[in-house]
Structures are given as structure tokens and as C-alpha cells.
Amino acid sequence: MSLSFFDNTDLASLPAFATSLAIGLLMGLERERSPAANAGLRTFALTAMWGTLSAMLAELTHMPSLIGFALAGVGIAITSSYFLMRPQNRDPGTTTQIALLLCFGLGILCWYDNQTLAAMLGICATLLLYFKTELSSMSRHMSRQDLLSILQFAALSFVILPVLPNQEYGPYQAFNPYQTWMMVVLISGVGLAGFIALRIFGAQLGGPLLGLLGGLVSSTATTLTYARQAHENPNLERFSTTIIVLANLMVFARLGIVGLFVAPAMARPLLTIMGSGLAAGLIVAGLQGRNEHETSATPAIKNPTELKTAFAFALLYSIVLFCSAWLNDVAGRSGIYLVALATGLTDVDAISLSSLRLFNQGRLESHAAMIAIALAVAANTVFKLGLILSIGGGSFAKRCVPTLLAALLGMLASVMLLHS
């Protein structure tokens, strides 16, 4: 995918080679740290560019077989270098060799206008190479229940979900099998992601990372899952608190960014409201963190996937959707606030995007759209506070509630100041 200022010039192919060079250097940099590996920065960089060059020549000469010959050359070079090295210096595994072949393939992708995909795969490959020790340790300590949880999630996500119809059924067309099952997948997925993050990064890094990702995917599912984990294992309370707090604060940041792109005319007041909630939450979270005692122990997640909890929440999700559809039918357009309160219980994004679109179309005033979004966030926050208290227990709620309540009050105070 050429950059516009290189089009129609002799350097139109340069971006593809630059991307393949960057991928090769990234993967080679990681391999340089392995004393046993017989390939490093230069080898990986040259292999990636060789892949791009072979694809270019194959296209120019109309001979696709050139790519096969180039790949065979890489294989011969790997094999010969391996046997020519001294036995004590040989890499006993095949990781570096496979990584070189992958690097060659990514170089080919760069030529065929797949530079973004190639870069993403290159980063993923580098992460796999870098976290060799952590991944090996995780697999060695994986129990039968852990493996069963991974298989369950794979079946839920890649066997059952794709065959479910993505359309509405029942009264008010409120039941969608695909979307309902997606909630099961989300709740199971965040639990499994927490298990993996905890094993690889530990509690100090795994919690914040998972909290940020959970806020992007589903803060409600994240809250439900880790409130359950904290209830079942008191050693997970601090870890779960970090995840839940960051996931819920991430909602304010996400909505502010969405408003910036969807409705630029309303971006300033929306950023003010969401920013106030985010700032208040961060201040309280920071004050709470100062009073926490550091711990080096890594808590253990007993059951990475919570199928029973996931099914129960999927049922609740369907009921709330039905009630929202009923309220919308009864209240009509004048009941936008009631609809916001109802739909906000499980999904803030739907009512937020709808309100912003109505504002863009001139069918909803800015202050009404702002209040509707704020009410949806408030309903969602109160719903999650109820989940934390009822599932996590009083002790765990004392950890999470102050930050979430501060964020909610900060947002509502900003709404009242803006519209006073």
C-alpha cells in the first residue's frame, strides 16, 4: 500500500520495503537476545526484504513460481547454516527457523497491499518469541480445569456463536440469539483473559492491562466476572479491584473519544462531562492506592471461565432488552430519558450513539442528548455497583464503590453546571 506522495514515481514500492524492513528488525531484535539463536537483526531484516523483493519480481515477470524458489532458497540457507555451525552453538529448537520463514511470508504480504496485517502479525510473533519463558511456565502449570476452560471458550466462540442467527425474534423483536450469546462469550472471555494476563504479567501489570482492555470490550462483563472472582477467592480482591475500577473509568474516556468523531459539534461539552467523571474517579483511585499495601504474591484464578454466571447474565441481558423495547414503545420519542435509563443498564454505547446521531440530524437538542448519555452512564454505573455489592460482597464493595461513585458524581455535577 503505497503512500500518496510516492505514487507514480520510481519510489512507489519503497513503503512496502520499509515496512518489511521494520518487521524484520523488530523480530530480529528479539532474537538477538537469545544466545542459542543462529539468526538476528540482519538476518531477519534481509529475509523480510527478500520476501518483498521475490513477490515484486514474481509480479513483474508474471512468474509466481519465483516466490516458491525464493522460499526454497531461504530453507536451504537455514539448513546449511544450522549444520555448518558448531554443535554447542546450535539452537536445539525450531523456533528461530520457523520465525525466519514467517518473516519471509510477512515480507510477501507487504508487497501485496497487506502492510497493516503484516505489521500486526509481526508484532504478535515478536510477543510470542519474547514471552517464551512465561508461556512455557504457564503451560507447565496448567491444570486440567484450565485446559477445559480454554476448550469451553473455544467452543462457545468458534463453534456455537457463528451458527446462531443475528436477527431479532419475539415480542418487540427484543431477542437476538447472536447478541445474547455474545454476552456469554464476553463474560467467559474476560475471565480467560484475566487468567492469561495473571500468568504472563503477574498481578502488578496484568490487572491494569486487563482493566483497560475490559473497558474497551465490556465494562459490565468485566465487572461481573471479577466481582465473582473476588467473592470466591479473597486473595484476588486487590487484583479484581484494579481491573474493575480501570474498566469502568475507561468508559468515560471511550465515550468522550467517540463523541469527538461522531458528533464534533458536541465534542466539547461531552468531553467536559466525561472528563470530569474520569478525573474525579482517578483522584479517588489514586488516594485509595496510597493506602494499599504492596504484595508480591500472585493470586490464583480457580476457574478462568464462569459459564454459570455467563448464562445467568445473558438471561438478565435479554430481559432488560425486552423492558427497554417496551419502554421505548410506550414512552415514544418523548421518553428518551426513560429509554436511556433502561438501555443504559446493559449497554451505554447504543443509546449514546443513537443520541449523537439524532443530534447530528437536528432531531435532538444538544442538552437533551447530553442528559440522555449521562443518564445511560449513571444507570450503567448504578447497575454495576449493584453487581459489585451483591456478588462481590461488602468488603469488596468498599474497595470499588468510592472510585465508581466519585466518577458518577463528578459527571453529574458537570452536567448540572453546564445546564444551570
Image: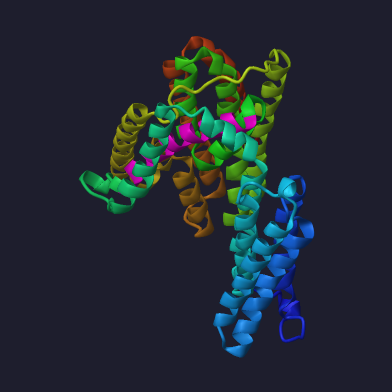
Depth order, front residue of 404/14: 14
Q: In this view, does 239 lie to the left or right of 284?
A: left
Please identify the quarter of the rendering in which residue 38 is found.
bottom right
Q: Residue at x 50, y 46 (%)?
A: 352
Q: Position of residue 173 (x, y in %)?
A: 25, 48
Magenta segment boundaries in residue numbering: 178-201
Instruction: Indicate whether residue 342 is drawn in magenta.
Output: no
Q: Can residue 211 be seen in this view?
A: no
SS assignment for the magenta stretch, majority:
helix
Residue 49 location (% of width, % of height): 71, 70
Q: Residue 150: image x %, image y %?
A: 42, 37
Q: In which quarter of the image is residue 408?
A: top right
286 to 68, vertically: above or below: above
Tell me residue 86's x, y (percent).
Answer: 75, 52
Q: Left or right: 53 with respect to 65?
A: right
Q: Is residue 145 above or below residue 272?
A: above
Camera-side residue: 230 or 256?
Answer: 230
Q: Nearer the viewer, residue 143 or 336?
A: 143
Q: In which quarter of the image is the N terminus?
A: bottom right
